[in-house]
Image: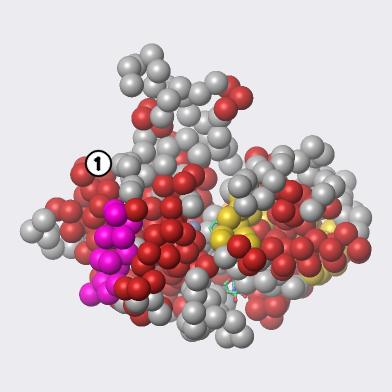
Amino acid sequence: MNAAQSETIYTYAAPRLKIGPGASAEVGFDLAATGAHRILVVTDPGVARSGGPQRVADQLTEHGLEATVYDQAHVEPTDDSLAAAVAWARDNGPWDGFVAVGGGSSIDTAKAINLLTTNSGELMDYVNAPVGGGQAPTQPLKPLVAVPTTTGTGSESTTICVLDVLSQHVKTGISHAALRPTLAVVDPDLTISQPAGVTASSGMDILCHALESYTAKPYTAYAKKHPHERVPYCGANPIADMWAEKALTLMAGSFRSAVHDGHDVSARYEMALAATFAGFGFGNAGVHIPHANAYPIAGRVKDFHPVGYPQEEAMIPHGMSVSLTAPAAFRFTFDASPDRHLRAASLLAPDAPKTPDPRDQLPSVLTALMRDIGIPNGIAAVGYTESDIPDLVEGSLKQQRLLTTAPREVTADDLTEIFRQSATLW
Ligand SMILES: NC(=O)c1ccc[n+]([C@@H]2O[C@H](COP(=O)([O-])OP(=O)(O)OC[C@H]3O[C@@H](n4cnc5c(N)ncnc54)[C@H](O)[C@@H]3O)[C@@H](O)[C@H]2O)c1
Ligand SMILES: [Zn+2]
């Protein structure tokens, strides 16, 4: 590619942000100022039990707003759970605005409700092609305030709603700039009640957002786009790099402490900052191989029931499924940008001993951390055997949007080797 054809432009977008202990107590004031009146608060049963969503609803009422709580968001939404949530919201509307209080599952459910109570059609019309119709909304959405209670997904700042399409055994999303929340309210006090297992898994999601966006194919390696072709994910760029580096530094100091002592308020605060920063980074740069592999790992779960999550259904939580192939994926991407891989490892573990092969430095720092915080020891520990690998590879290959963000070409053989190396990690 000659210089005239390579990309020179990248973009950056983020919602308005209010952040700090106690920030969620101001949601009523902020929403009242928009002129909205009938508000739907979206959450899941586990977060509802923490009392946070009801406190937010009470405070909306104090500001003269009418607040209703919908507490049936499914942990890791499916097409069925989102359709049920939308049907409920359509039956009980109209709504002037939405507040999501919860992790990525509640926030993504609120995004789907907002889309489908302001626009006609059904969920699958808007799901990314080829799984769904890939339609864009034609009508403006209502204000959505996203209040994360996990330290993980960054969904409060992104344009995506992730869902599992049960009939097709595939995880995919709805992605459009209109889905981005209008205001993100990050209140670390709400994250203190996260179970340790959720803190560990959602924290690995933060870490992979930062590492994958930092090592993604640089925006300059893409062909030049026309203005109408621009997408939210531009590849690694100086602005996303800055957020990723800072997120890694924060996690170096706080991740283990937040898992081992959930009441360590300063660790919780730094994890909330790290999740937000990593979200601002990957939400503009994109993620690659570990996230592509996470979709089949989570989607083909057999009988794994992680501690800290609802036990009724087998599941491999998003952050856990992302992390399991991350060490091998970063060994594979090392040669594309050795300096970035080494810098990421040193930000995350400044005092880690040097591995004889520099390709192993970041994988070794990651596996030491995963071991300390109770992440399962590889894909074997969550139920996969050698004979499942072709299926997992096939599932990853469907995530071409993510794989093309990798800094080098990824073939089926490469993915096979990455899954093999990920059977056990230590
Ligand atoms: N939209 C995006 O940009 C994006 C990015 C990454 C992941 N995701 C999606 O987000 C979902 C995962 O979200 P998550 O990791 O934030 O977790 P989650 O929302 O699935 O919640 C995990 C569990 O923790 C509980 N919980 C959450 N906060 C709590 C609190 N403060 N106190 C007590 N319990 C609490 C919930 O009840 C649930 O049982 C997945 O579906 C994933 O695919 C979305
Ligand atoms: Zn993620």
Q: Which amino acid type corresponds to the residue marked 1 in the rendered image?
A: Ser
On screen, 98 above or below 134? below
- Asked which quadrant contains residue 194, the reply is bottom right
The residue shown at (50%, 71%) is 300
Using residue 425 as the reference point, say whether residue 390 is left or right of it.
right
- Asked which quadrant contains residue 217, the reply is top left
Give the quadrant of ligand 1.
bottom right
Span of residues in magenta: 413-426
Q: Quadrant of the N terminus?
A: top left
> What percent of the width, then of the height, locates residue 405?
41, 42
From where the camera sits, is residue 290 visible? yes
Which residue appears farthest toward the left when viewing the image?
Answer: 356
On screen, 348 above or below 320? above
Using residue 373 as the reference point, say whether residue 295 is left or right of it.
right
SS for callout 1: loop
- Asked which quadrant contains residue 390, the reply is bottom left
Q: Nearer the viewer, residue 413 or 29?
A: 413
Disc 1 CB within 8 Å of nearest ligand 2 atom: no
- The colour scheme of the drawn protein is secondary structure
Using residue 347 as the reference point, say whether residue 33 is left or right of it.
right
Indicate yes or no whether the magenta region holds residue 415. yes
The residue shown at (72%, 53%) is 124
> What percent of the width, then of the height, locates residue 225?
50, 23
Residue, disc 1: 337
Taken as a whole, is the magenta stretch helix, strand or loop?
Answer: helix
